[in-house]
Image (cartoon, grey):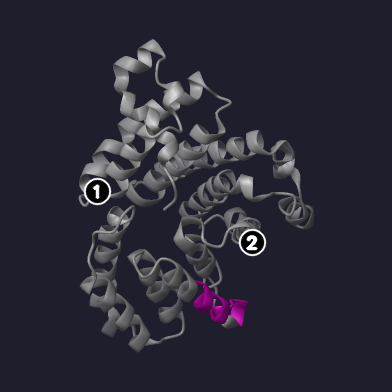
Amino acid sequence: MGDWRQLAAIGCLVPALAMGGCASLIGNRAADTLSAAVLNQDDPGIVESGLPAYLLIVDGFVAQDPENAGLLAGGAQLYALYGSRFEPDQDHAAVLTEKARRYGQRALCLEHEPACRWATLSYEPFVAELATLTKRHTDALYAYAVSWLSHLSVTSSDWTAVAELPWVQAALERLLELDEQYDDGGVHTYLGILNSLRPPALGGRPDVAKAHFERSIELSAGLDLSTKVEYARRYARMMFDQELHDRLLEEVIAAPTQAPGRTLFNVLAKRDAAELLETSTEYF
């Protein structure tokens, strides 16, 4: 999820990197080519095998232009994707997503200097600082929040990570205030997940989660199949609503895979939907 267009420099390939001739291309139309190639790829195996090389090249560009917030934000999302979705080794996934988090923090720090000191803040001052962000900070804030969340997702057995979830949720809620339609409503999906991590008896807010999932589906016109999968996985299973669970997953399986900017994630969503549906009777 998210906009990877800041990774355009990868399209220059290694020879140009040696000459230092790609940095000026970051952010221009060439970025759309890479974004389309990755997000519209219907073979996750190609992405999985190709991303490590891209990560090395991104690191090279960041080293060459360390003050480029756009490149850092794009790199944060790329590392977050690979670490949380494609890396099977949990220890290595934690390393990758920690780098994603560092890149996301640096991107927001460059775009909003006070954010450089946010790591030292307690919750209430952190929320107050978030209120100072404006719509021009949305790209950096998205990278900051999603990369942080990706790291927490692969270190969820660590109680320190669990304790940080309210900070990430606050950042996503601020992003929602700034631009509800960012990523075609994808922020609602993240908030749906966060509000359904705990059952109602332990402080979870399933009604809030449901509203976020429904709104995300509405804003994406149903084209983001991963939202329906998470709706089924997080909410329907928690509430033991098999009818909703199976309906959502059957809709995902029956839906077209191709969708601009979402094909890769839709293919992955279909795989997840089939697995969840196969265990439906056993679960419920």
Q: What residue type is labelled 2?
A: Glu
- Which residue position holds label 1? 41
| Place of residue 55 in the rendered image (x, y in percent of width and height, measured from the top left) | 38, 32
Label 2 secondary element: helix
Q: Residues within 10 Å of mark 1 (few under 14, many from 20)?
A: many
Q: How crowded is mark 2: few (under 14 residues within 10 Å), some or many (20 or more)?
A: few
| Place of residue 78 in the rendered image (x, y in percent of width and height, measured from the top left) | 41, 41
Q: In this view, does 29 lie to the left or right of 204?
A: left
Residue 177: image tag: 2
Q: In this view, does 217 lie to the left or right of 258?
A: right
The magenta region covers: 201-212
Residue located 59% across and 78% down the image: 205
Q: Is residue 146 above or below residue 111?
A: below
| Place of residue 245 in the rendered image (x, y in percent of width and height, measured from the top left) | 35, 81
| Place of residue 26 in the rendered image (x, y in percent of width and height, measured from the top left) | 44, 29
Q: Residue furthest front?
A: 29
Q: In this view, does 58 lie above or below 197?
A: above
